[in-house]
Image (spheres, rainbow, N blue to C red):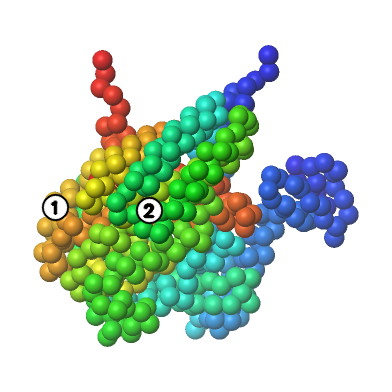
Amino acid sequence: MIGREGGIYNPHAGPVAQGQSVRLITGWFQVRILAGPPFLRGLIMLQERIEEYLSAKIGADSVAVSHLQRIPGGASRETWSFDATWRENGNEVERGFVLRRDPDASLLETERDLEFRVMDALAGHGVPVPKMYWLESEGAFLDRPFFVMERIDGCETSPTKVLMDPRFFVVRALLAERFVAILACIHSLDWRASGLDFLGAPADEAGCGLMEIEKWEGVVDRDALEPQPVLRAAFRWMRRHPPPPAQRIVLVHADYRTGNFLCDSEGAIRGILDWEMVHLGDPMEDVAWACIRPWRWLGDESIGGLIEREQFYKRYEKASGFTVVPEAIRFWELLGNAKLAAIFLTGARSFCEGRTRSPMMAFLGRNIARLELEIMDLMGV
Amino acid sequence: MRPTAIESLRAAQAALAELIAPELASAFALDAAQTVQMLLESLASEWDTAAETLSRDNETLSSLLSASGEALTGAPSRNESVAPIVSQIERLRDDRASSLVLSDLASRNGSLRAALESVLVAFEELTGRPGSEMIDEVRNRIYNHLREEAAGGWSFWDVSSFRGRMAALQPPPS
């Protein structure tokens, strides 16, 4: 039921005059319905505004944007893919881009500037990341802040594809090897020399655990809509059982897992994605995060669906020079599950307060029970 | 006879899977449809027993809180934070409701869980100390109950990451 061009969609009253609007009350949400098919109109407007933006950035008279489409996943920001063509020195240039725009509401309240700067700084250091092009911290161009980066074609990120598509079966061992090697590479990066001091290091190696406890307990304080006995008890447990001091303070990706890398069917990992939680801290945090049950997609004990835990540890130790300490891993796995639950609580609050209509936010907010089960397993209670 | 709430939810799921999803062209829309499908599944799975589940949880929580109040009162190493928790538990004891309206049950559940939250945080401080046997015993009972609750219902994790973990919780076939 979409009104004819120039009319207004109103399921109850039929078309009304252009320029007017009606309000459709849907549950908690009041949705303003404007003239024309809303999604298509919005898409065309966005495409035109991206063309204007790129024209200004590239310095070309006419940039044409095509195949603009929203990509699923990456719930903390809107992710859009598009092709752009323009003329440069008499030649036609065509390039694929990805645009990451701040949403109205998100699973995570993070700084896109930070993500952009870290990914930009990593270029040329052995960590595969898309090339970063432009960052806009204001909403002048596309209503909300965003950044634009290179699109890496011919790859998959979805765990379902990477772990269950037969094309990837034969390269799983290779993917596991690269997965470990790149993590070690991230942790070996000289973050001071790379200009990443702005991330703010913990006071000392012993302070890494407490810094993350306070960060995520703060999110629960801010966003929980209901009492959270298991999470509260877990944070108290973690305060009483802090991890051993970090062996060294390193760059921590903080969301390193199957599902956050781009890989091809040759077994190459061509891009590490989703750096919005990046910080300086304990390398064991990343090792443990990769291990937590929610990312063991195949439902067995293999880490990330890729590799047995013992092998993962051995290869990581060999590649990084760090020792994997079981006591530290237990703490960081517990923290990881609590952190994931906290992220879901943020999404649930956004939904319940009407800042988003995303079914994902509603859905995830109803799914922390299994994380609680895992938390209690790790606490040993 | 009119369709029940669950039958209606199943009809919505079927329409989404069989009529709507095949018409969707974009990956983003398909992803959203899949999420809605799972959201409906979680609603359908708990609809019929929601009131009973909440009511039973409330009864168990009340009982655990009573035991917690006694354990806290008798704890040798209790501190000044314990008295307000005991008062909170006593207030809840006088506030029993008989309504089976879901929002009433959920509201009562929220109050009980808020008290349990304070109790568990206090227990995590007191457990394992000399003379804390009563605390430890009630703490174990609380976690056993919370584990049962956390393992109940339907979760999308159960079809992927938690498949093995949840299978391990199933009783062996007789």
Q: Secondary structure at mark 2?
A: helix
Residue at the image position 41 percent from the left and 58 percent from the top: B81
- Residue at screen point 32% across, 34% down: B166
Quarter the N terminus of chain A occupies: top right
Pointer 1 local density, CA inside 10 Å: few below 14, some 14–19, many at least 20: some
What residue does disc 2 label? B121
* Cα distance between the residues tagged 2 and 1: 37 Å
Q: Same chain for marks 2 and 1?
A: no
**Most foreground residue, A25 or A241:** A241
Q: Is residue A228 left or right of residue A181?
A: right
Q: Where does the image place residue A243, in percent across and percent down from the top left?
A: 23, 63
Query: Which residue shows up at 13% across the image and 51% down it?
Result: A310
Quick one: A259 or A356, which is closer to the camera? A356
Whole-percent x, y for residue A90 in the image: 51, 81
Asked which quadrant contains residue B137, the reply is top left
Chain designation of label 2: B
Closer to the camera: disc 2 or disc 1? 2
**Label for residue A92?**
none
Q: Which mark is residue A311?
A: 1
Query: Three-letter amino acid code at disc 2?
Result: Val
Number of numbered discs overlaid on the protein picture: 2
Subunit under mark 1 = A
Image quarter of residue A377: top left
Vertical comparison of B46 with B150: above or below = above
Left or right of A212: which side holds A151?
right
